[in-house]
């Protein structure tokens, strides 16, 4: 089963989402801040990354920029999660290199649809915006 790296500093959100993903059959690895998220992406080689944008040490935008700047991790699809539904966040996530975007609180079925689309190579909502598919 695909391995998902979940980067989330809020313990309750992290536990809830990881349990739901495990129940769906995904392997889940966890990081609690942006810096450890970047490191875990390199050591764990996940198939997809779910990353909260509001994180300690490195925020989600900076962590994603770093993930997308190195060959070892730039191909891994990244879905940004944020509590802020403001339209500007979408552009900010895209600029940082995120492949898709979802808002919290997470609606599991909607998020699973985005995860499955990216894992199957069909891209997320941002796939048409110039994200390389190699
Ligand atoms: Mn957070």
Image: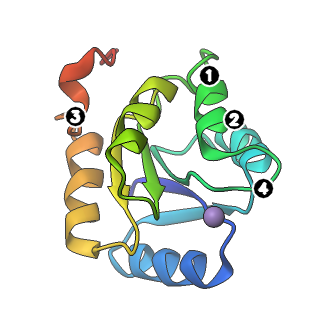
Which label sits in the foreground, 3 or 4? 4
- Which circle's residue, 3 or 4, is located before the other in the chain? 4
Q: Nearer the viewer, mark 2 or mark 3?
A: 3
Residue, disc 4 = 56
Q: Residue at x 37, y 32 (%)?
A: 91
Q: Earlier in the sequence, mark 1 or mark 4?
A: 4
Give the class, few, some or many, for how many residues have Cα within 10 Å of label 4's Cα (few <14, many ≥20): few
Is residue 96 depicted above or below 27 in this figure? above
Label disc, if present, on residue 8 of the rendered structure: none
- The quadrant of the picture occupied by the C terminus is top left
Q: Which residue is mark 1?
A: 72
Q: Position of residue 81 (x, y in %)?
A: 45, 56
What residue is drawn where x is 73% and y is 62%? Answer: 32
> Which residue corresponds to the image point at 16% horizontal and 35% vertical from the top-left?
122
User: Helix or strand or loop: what does disc 3 sit on?
Assistant: loop
Q: CA gap, disc 2 to disc 4?
A: 19 Å
């Amino acid at each position: 089963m695909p391995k998902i790296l979940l980067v989330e500093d809020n313990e309750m959100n992290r536990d809830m989402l990881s349990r739901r993903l495990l129940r769906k059959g995904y392997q889940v690895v966890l990081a609690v801040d942006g810096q450890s998220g970047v490191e875990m992406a390199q050591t764990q080689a996940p198939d997809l990354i779910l990353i909260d944008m509001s994180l300690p040490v490195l925020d989600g935008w900076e962590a994603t920029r770093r993930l997308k700047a190195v060959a070892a991790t730039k191909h891994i699809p990244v879905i940004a999660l944020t509590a802020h539904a403001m339209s500007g966040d979408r552009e900010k996530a895209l600029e940082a290199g995120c492949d898709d975007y979802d808002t919290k609180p997470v609606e599991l079925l909607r998020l699973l649809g985005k995860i499955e689309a990216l894992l199957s190579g069909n891209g997320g909502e941002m796939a048409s915006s110039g994200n390389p598919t190699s």
